[in-house]
Amino acid sequence: QVQLVESGGGLVQAGGSLRLSCRASGTIFSLRTMGWYRQGPGKQRELVARITSSGRTNYADSVKGRFTISRDNANNTVYLQMNSLKSEDTAVYYCGADARSLNHNGDYWGQGTQVTVST
C-alpha cells in the first residue's frame, strides 16, 4: 500500500502564504501523477493542481498565478506553494497520487489538511 501524509495547513490572513507538503511512503513500485485537491464547506472536491512524474503541471483557473506545485521524486514528495491567499481558498486540502504498489494500481488519498484564510 501507499500512504500519503500531508502537512503545512493552518490559519493565515488573506494575502498571506502557506506551503503544503505531501510525502508518499510504503511499497511503491511507481508514483505517477501527484496532485492537490480541495473541498470547501458545502462544495464538492475539486482539482487544485497536479504534476506528472516528468514535471508537467496543470492548475485550476482559480489558482493560476498564485499557487505553484512541485515535486521531489527522490523523496516521493509533492509541494503546493500558495501565495496571495483568499478567503475562497479556505478548504480541506487533499493530496492524491496515481501509484502502483504491491496490492493496488490506482488512486491513493491523504487524510487532508485544513487551510483557513481569514479576512
Image (cartoon, grey):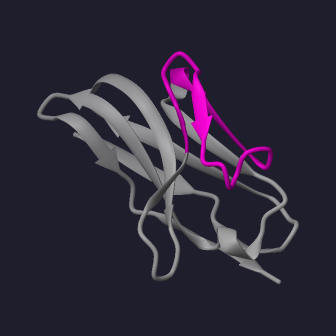
Q: Is residue 117 left or right of residue 34?
A: right
Q: Position of residue 55 (x, y in %)?
A: 58, 21
Q: Nearer the viewer, residue 73 or 86?
A: 86
Quadrant where the image shows the C terminus: bottom right
Q: Looking at the picture, does residue 25 appear above or below residue 74? A: below
The stretch drawn in magenta includes residue 60: yes
The residue under the point 80% across, 44% down is: 65
Q: Is residue 68 left or right of residue 101?
A: right
Quadrant where the image shows the N terminus: top left
Give the image quarter of residue 102: top left
Q: Nearer the viewer, residue 27 or 52?
A: 52
Q: Looking at the picture, does residue 6 appear above or below residue 25? A: below
Toward the right, the furthest residue is 15
Q: Is residue 41 left or right of residue 115?
A: left
Q: Is residue 48 left or right of residue 53?
A: right
Toward the front, the furthest residue is 61
The residue under the point 23% across, 35% down is: 106
The residue under the point 43% across, 30% down is: 33
Toward the left, the furthest residue is 103
Give the image quarter of residue 100: top left
Count of number-bearing discs? 0
Q: Position of residue 60 (x, y in %)?
A: 60, 48
Q: Which residues are magenta?
A: 49-74
Q: Looking at the picture, does residue 50 appear above or below residue 28? A: below
Q: Position of residue 77 (x, y in %)?
A: 53, 35
The residue under the point 73% across, 76% down is: 87
The stretch drawn in magenta includes residue 12: no
Q: Position of residue 11 (x, y in %)?
A: 72, 76
Q: Looking at the picture, does residue 11 appear above or below residue 95? A: below
